[in-house]
Image (cartoon, rainbow, N blue to C red):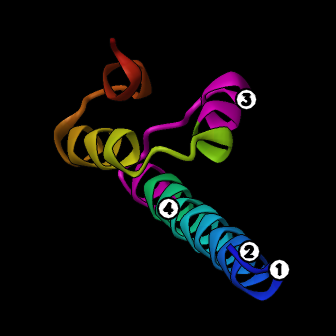
Amino acid sequence: MTTSEYEKTFVEKIHDEGKSEGIAEGEAKALLRLMSARGLAPSQAQQNRMSSCTDSAQLDLWFDRAVTAATAAEVFAD
């Protein structure tokens, strides 16, 4: 692999990671907004859990639960 190929691969990897982090950040914001709109008040620990999560599948699961959950605890039940 030449240096320029390595640099391109490295830059693409950094770009992809940044894109994934941005998507997860947006999903976490949408989840918090949904919970707020439904009157579900997540604790500070739950908010930290949402904002630090980079797994889109996990965020999607929490979002789906938040649609019908009666409490914030139900959203994050494992």
In this view, the residue in front, 59 or 30, is: 59
In this image, 5 relative to 30: left or right? Answer: right
Residue named by callout 2: 6
10 Å neighbourhood of mark 3: few (<14), some, or many (≥20)?
A: few
Q: Is the magenta stretch mostly helix, strand or loop?
A: helix
Q: Could you tell me if the residues under marks 1 and 2 are in contact, i.e. CB atoms within 8 Å?
A: yes
The quadrant holding residue 6 is bottom right
Residue named by callout 3: 44
**Vertical placement of 60 versus 10: above or below?**
above
Q: Give the amino acid at mark 2.
A: Tyr
Name the element at disc 4. helix
Q: In which quarter of the image is the N terminus?
A: bottom right
Residue named by callout 1: 3
Nearer the N terminus, badge 1 or badge 3? 1
**Vertical placement of 19 versus 60: above or below?**
below
Nearer the N terminus, badge 2 or badge 4? 2
Q: Quadrant of the C terminus?
A: top left
